[in-house]
Amino acid sequence: MEGIIDYLRVLKGWEVILLLREVNKGVKVSIRSRFLDAGKFAKTFGGGGHKEAAGCNIPLPIEEAEKKLLEELRKWMEC
């Protein structure tokens, strides 16, 4: 599962990729981005990384984690 997000990067037309995976304590999120700082975005959720690749863990059910991530991403995209 870890390498799947890097395969998605070969697709054309993407700006941000969020890959969510359920784990025992919530959701593991992998983030790739071409325009926003993925590390700073992940830090919003207690994670980290660098400008193009980052990750975090969110201790929520996957549906709630997805909602929170997309809400925050919309805010970042408005800036």
Image (cartoon, rainbow, N blue to C red):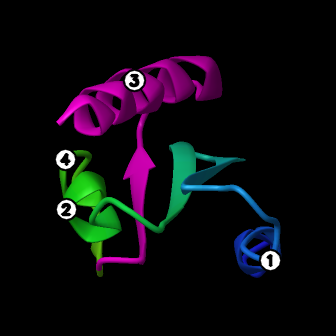
Q: Mark 2 points at which residue?
A: 40
Q: Is residue 65 left or right of residue 44?
A: right
Residue 44 in view here: yes
Q: Distance between the residues labelled 2 and 1?
A: 23 Å
Q: What residue type is labelled 3?
A: Lys
> How far apart are the two marked residues, 4 and 3, measured between alpha carbons?
11 Å
Which one is earlier in the sequence, the residue at label 2 or at label 3?
Answer: 2
Q: Is residue 61 above or below residue 17?
A: above
Of the residues shown, which amino acid type is indicated by label 1?
Val
Q: Which stretch did the figure color magenta?
A: 51-79
Spatial separation of the CA atoms under disc 2 and disc 3: 16 Å
Where residue 43 sits in the image (x, y, percent)? 20, 58
Crowd around label 2: few <14 · some 14–19 · many ≥20 (10 Å):
some
Q: Looking at the picture, how far across and down is residue 4, in whole percent? A: 81, 72
Q: Is the Cβ of the residue at disc 2 closer than 8 Å to that at disc 4? A: yes
Q: How crowded is mark 4: few (under 14 residues within 10 Å), some or many (20 or more)?
A: few
Q: Mark 1 points at which residue?
A: 10
* Residue holding disc 4: 44
Residue sitting at 46 percent across and 27 percent down? 70
Mark 3 element type = helix
Residue visible at 72% across and 77% down in the picture: 2
Residue appearing at x 76%, y 81% in the figure: 3
Of residue 27 and residue 74, the one placed in the foreground of this image is: 74
